[in-house]
Every structure is written in C-alpha cells, then in structure tokens.
Image: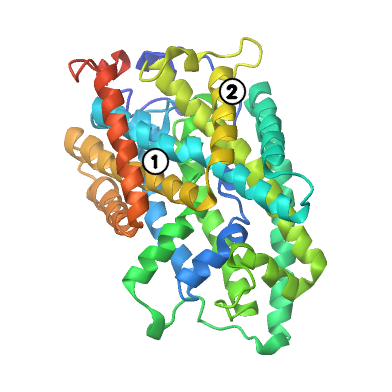
Amino acid sequence: MNPSVQGPTDSLSSVEQYGYKQELKRSLSFWDLVVYGLIFMVPIAPMGIYGQVVQTAHGMVVFAYFIGLVGMIFTAYSYARMSEAFPISGSAYAYVQRGWNPYIGFLAGWMILLDYILIPSLLYLVSASWLAELVPGIPTWLWIVVFVAINTIINILGIQLTSRANWIILVFELVTFILFCVMAFAYVAGGHGHTTFTAAPIYQAHAFSWSMVGAATSIAVLSFLGFDGISTLAEETRGGRRTVGRATVTALIVIAVLFMVLTYLAACAYPDFMHFPDPDVAFYFVAERVGGTWLKVLCLAATVIAWGIANALAAQAAISRLLFSMGRDRALPGFLAKVHPRFQTPYTSTLLVAVVSVIVSVASSIGTLSSLVNFGALTTFLLLNLTVVIYHFIKRRSGRWFTHLVMPLLGFAVLLYVWLNFDRLTLRLGVAWAIIGVIVLAIRTRGFRRAPQPMQLEQ
C-alpha cells in the first residue's frame, strides 16, 4: 500500500510521512470546511458584480454562472483527488509540486499567490468603497484598516474562532438571500412592472455567442473562487483523507445552485439590464425595486459584511496557510512558517498578509484587482487539472480513464477557453507576474540546479 494514495480513514495521515511536523491544531469537521467554503465564495456574491456579469452576458446571467460551475466542478474533483493523495497544507502548490514536478509546483504556488494575496485586498477595497458611498464622511482607507484589523485578530486567535465567526455570518447571508428571493418571487409572480418568469436569463438564441459566454464567465468565476481554499486547511482537519475533497465538491455545488437562483430571480425582476443607473451597484436597484429601501439597505449591508469580513476572513486564512506551507519548504523566506506558541496559528504570514492587503487596497483599482485575481486562479487550476492526469493516470497508472483522465481534461478545456477570453491588459500583467516567478525560482534554486528539500522526497 502506498501511503501517499491510500491510508487510514479515521483521521488525516500524519504529515510526518511527508517530511513535516504536525504543528497546526486539528479541529475542523466536514461541515466546518463546507461552511468555510461557502463563506469564502459568499452565497450572495453575485450581488456585488451582478451588473458587470448580466450586461456582458447579454442578459444570460444564469448561463454564465452555469458554465462557470461546469469548469469549476471538474477542477473541484481534481482538488478532491489530489487532497486524498497528499493531505497536507499548500493547496495546488503542494499537489502540483509532489504530483507533477517541483519547479512547476513552485510556479503553481506563485500563480495562486496572485489570487490569494490579492483577493483580500479586492474584498476590502470593494466593501470600503460601498461604505464610503453610504457614509461619505469616512474615507475609504479608514474602512480598509478597520476590516484588516478585525480579520487579522480573529485569524491569529485561532482557526476555531474563525470557524465560529463563519457560522454566524453565513446565517446572516442566508437570511438576506432568502428574503430577497421571496420578495423577488412575489414581485415577478404578481406581474409588477410587466415582469414574468422567462427563460431569457438562461438562454437567448439571438444573443448567444461563445465569445460572449467566455467573456461573461471570466467575470462570473470570481464568485466561485474560494472552493480551492478548503484544501489549505488540510492539516487542521479531522475525519479522514476524503474529508477535504468531499467538502470541496459539496460547497461548490451548493453555492452554484444559490448563485443561479439568485441571479435568475434578479434578472426576471429587472429585465432591462442595460439601463441600470449605476452598473457597479446594479443589484441594489433590483433589491429596491422588489422590496423597497429596507431591502436595498439590507442587501448592501449583507454584501459589505460578507465581502469585507466573512470572505476576507476566509481569504486571509487561506493565503496565510499557503505562505506558511511555502515558507516551511523554504520556497519563500522561512519566517513565514512561524507558528504562534499559544494559538497554534501561522501568525507571521497572517500579519504579512494584513500589511500587504492595506497597501494594495489603497493603491489599486477594483477592475485591475478583479482581473488579476481571476488570472492567477485559473492559471493554477489549469496546472492542477493536468497534474491529476500526470500523477494518477500516467505515473501511478491507475487505469481510471474517466476519473483520472476525462474529467480533469474536460476541466482543463473549459477553463482554458475562459482563460483565453481575458482582456489583453490582464494577460500582460499575468504573464509579467509569471516571469517574476520564474526569476524568483531561479534565484531560490541557484539557476535550477537544485530543488527545495521537501520536493526531493519520493512518495
């Protein structure tokens, strides 16, 4: 029996077999991981980018989210297969590193850094911008500092506290989701404003084109980002090797259903999608139409809390674990692997993320951050899907054609199509980030003459 592929099911195998020391506290259950994933992806995430998605999709907003699910579900299964093989922190970085090649593994970690390290900044900036509009007297940068401080303290105090906070915020998000859906359903069913339930948000033959689908989905996938963050908590999870994989797939399916229900009702209630007073906050005009000012304010408050606290809290936890893992491997400076002696959390990497988040949030724009976050994530997902084929089907010769060959290649194909539909600026900036990663790798490996020590272990 190869321990890297099979192992005990009562708890995740000890990380000692991979050359590491178990330092993080194992306390998270399957449902804790599912909630973490839902919080990271945010059940009401489409509220924040609804205007951009529905306009780019020519009204077929549900179809855009469905295509996003198709691409992501195959990738989620790839995460599941690799998390079973290597139940350690590090997410795609660790999986590509050990399953395919140490150098490509570093680049996978480098590219996902673009996603993980920028997404907290994006979330803080979006939330602070909305609050600055609601309360003009308080500057955006001050809101950013407040959000960062709250999340940093919670993350350093422990993953269990993060988990408890996630449960509370998730309930609030779901209540907001239900209230909007009930009000929107009643509004459309009552025929207000000549609205009706229609297939237009799902498919319109006259407006359909694959280039449009690719462009819209490249925006919509931002709402799905986060399911992969579950794998960064592998060393803090109890319940067996399959726990992380099952939680990843479950969270993705649940969130996709919520996204499609939410956007379908919004599109039916406000069919004139090209004439929002302000597309950046389009959903709040939909909420005001179906429920009045109180529902608009509720949706605004829920989105701010979801993005600025809950989602950013989960994002900061994920990136700190990735930096911890890469620091432990000496792929990045070793101080990032320091663990707090009392709280058993990677506090130095958490503090670094806090500092970077403040700087990037204040100095960047929402549009640029959104595009770069998506580019980093999808590039890494492409590498991960190929890793499943290389590790399981080619190296291990599993013989499982559908699971280890067809599914990951389908995921690769869908995501590649979306990737190719990024705008030129995003592609240029993303490639520049990749080139910097190659330079860093060359320096860390002395001109590619040696690999970091943990990558030399044979599984």
The image shows residue 12 at horizontal and vertical percentages of 47, 25
Q: Residue at x 64, y 27 (%)?
A: 155
Q: Which residue is mark 2?
A: 351
- Residue 51 horizontal/vertical position (percent): 56, 67
Task: Nearest to the eye among marks 2 and 1: give it.
Answer: 2
**Residue type highlighted by circle 1:** Tyr
Q: Is residue 146 above or below residue 65?
A: above
Q: Nearer the viewer, residue 380 or 86?
A: 380
Q: Residues within 10 Å of mark 1 (few under 14, many from 20)?
A: many
Q: Quadrant location of the C terminus?
A: top left
Lateral position of residue 226 relative to residue 419, left or right = right
Residue contact at pointers 2 and 1, CB within 8 angstroms: no
- Helix, strand or loop at mark 1: helix
Residue 46: image x %, image y %?
Answer: 58, 60
- Quadrant of residue 101 within the rendered picture: top left
Residue 105: image quadrant is top left
Q: Position of residue 216 (x, y in %)?
A: 43, 65
Describe residue 130's horizontal placement relative to residue 384 as left or right.
Answer: right
Viewer-proximal residue among 178 and 367? 367
* Quadrant that contains the N terminus: top left
Residue type (three-letter) at the residue carrying disc 2: Leu
Residue 164 found in image quarter: top right
> Which residue lies at the image location 73% right of the left edge and 70% below the top edge?
182
| N-term-proximal mark, 2 vs 1 | 1
As drawn, which residue projects farthest toward the top? Answer: 341
Residue 79, label in figure: 1
Q: CA distance from mark 2 to mark 1?
A: 27 Å
Residues 430 and 48: in front is: 430
